[in-house]
Every structure is written in C-alpha cells, then in structure tokens.
Amino acid sequence: MTQTLRIATRQSELALWQARHVQVRLQTALPEVEVVLLPIRTEGDRVLDRPLAEIGGKGLFLKELEAALADGEADLAVHSMKDVPAELPPGFALPTVLAPGSPLDAFVSNDHDSVEALPAGARVGTSSLRRAAMLKHLRPDLEIANLRGNVQTRLAKLDAGEYDAILLACAGLERLELAARIRSALTPEQSLPAIGQGVLGIEIRADDEVTASRIAALDDEYTHIRVDAERAVNARLEGSCHLPIAAHAEHDGSTLWLRAAVGKPDGSVMVRDEISGPTGEAAGLGQALAERLLAAGADRILADLA
C-alpha cells in the first residue's frame, strides 16, 4: 500500500513554490511515500483591502492550515517562518526548519536605485509594520502606504505608478525567479529583518510522531539555532504582526550574535540592542535581549500599541 504525506499550503504562487520545494525534498528522502499538496485559501489571502494588523495579523495565514492538520485532512503545513506567531496553538509543533534563503528586505523601484535615492515625499508601499517603521526611521520624509496582495499583484501596482517604490522580501523574489526586480537589498542596519525571514518551517500535530520522524532529515541545524534565538525575542515581547519587532541572528557554530529592535510604527522611536553568547544558549540569549529592549523603552512602545 502506498503511503501518503499531505502538505497543507496557501494558494499564492510563492506559498505553492515553498510547498513544492518541501514536496521535492521529502519525495527524494522518502521515495516510498507519495507526497501531495492540499492548497487552501486562507482568510489572510481573502481580505486584501485592509492592513494585516487590522484584521488579526499574520496568524490569519495559518489558522485554516492548522484546521486541516487538526481534522486529519493534512499531515503537515509549510510556512514562511516570519508569518508564524511566537506561540503555536495547543496541539501543534514546529520541529523542522529548512536551510534559509536571504533574510534581507528588498527595495524594488523602476526609477530609483536605493532608499537614499528616493526624492522627499516619495510614496513607498509595504504591508509590514516592521518595514514601515524601519523605513520611516531611516527616511522620515517618505510617505508609507499600505500594499497588500501576492508578489505579482504588488509588482503590478508598482508598475502602474501607484508607488515610487515597494518593499518586499529578497527571498520571495528570488524563489519566484524575480530577483532582477531587486534594485538593492537593505542591510540589517537599514532594515533589521523580520523574525525567521527567509526560513521555511514545517508544522505538524504535536502527537504525530510518524510525520515528525519523516520530516526530521530536512531540519537544518544552523538555521534552527538562529530561529530559536529570534523567536525567543518575540515570545518574551509577546510579539505579533501588530507590532514592529525585528530580530536577526547569525552564528559560527559556537558563538551567536543576535540583534533586535522594537519601534513605533511611525519610526519616530527605535529601540535597538544586540547580544552574543554560546549557540547552545540561543533561546536564553533571545530572552535576555528582549529584557534589555523592554528596560530601554520597548515596554512603553508595546504598551502604547496594545
């Protein structure tokens, strides 16, 4: 009897690319198992006329996929880790993360080469409060406008002249073979990446030991350490898509370097700090850095946004 693994995925082109990437990896590792996709349209994909923060945050991209897992319709779900809340609902686990793409934000424009080259008052589109806060902190004179939809829709709005530039993820553009649209990649100093940006994660039912064993070979140890540190920051800050929170970790196998930031949505205040220590203490370093951010004023920013 043919064994089957069913992957729940959003229906956007980028989400399908991500699911197919995992499908191919699993099919190669488990030739005796048939790996199939279960495309699902999520609420986050249906409601496109309002900012994500107004309709419940990025968790809206997960709940229908998690319902399919809970009902036994799917065995696993593939997510962009930057869309995964700090705390999973009871009954779910995220044991596997894959080797990452670029963690950086992409500056995309048809007329300007960089953020610095934008004229005063230029209109920049993004759906991310974090990107908006980072950009306004860098360039307070710019106009930030909400931009929803899939990657192709956002590019089409730029091409139609609705924006002077837009901000997207380098990894998404590269995965869709649209890297030529990247005019420049923003450095972490310009725009500290989102937690887990560029990383794919696999979510399963917490009690599904069979699926856990099947996907274990796909886990990338280097990336898992990085993600543990970044997500620990978010967990301590009780972060979500509603909040402009950023964190990015790097390590050499023994020492981890973690940077994090919390900002006001208008960019007027940006609390940043960094920490380093043993990779074996990744989660503890994330918690410690979050405590330092809170003590430096992030607590007031978060309280104002609550």
Image (tube, rainbow, N blue to C red):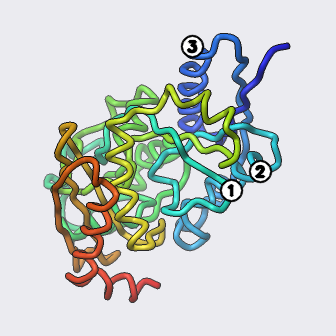
Q: Residue at x 47, y 58 (%)?
A: 147
Three-letter amino acid code of the residue under disc 3: Thr
Is residue 106 visible in the rendered image? The answer is no
- Image spot of residue 148 (x, y percent): 52, 56
Dot label at residue 232: none
**Label 2 crowd (10 A; few <14 / some 14-19 / many >=20):** some
Q: CA distance from mark 2 to mark 3?
A: 26 Å
The structure residue drawn at horizontal position 45% and vertical position 60%, both measured from the top left corner, is 127
Q: Quadrant of residue 50?
A: bottom right
Compute the Cα span from label 3 to label 1: 28 Å
Residue, disc 2: 70
Where is residue 234 drawn, in percent x and y?
40, 65
Q: Closer to the camera, 213 or 161?
A: 213
| Picture disc at residue 28 | 3
In primary-sequence order, the first of circles 2 and 3 is: 3
Read off the residue under disc 1: 91
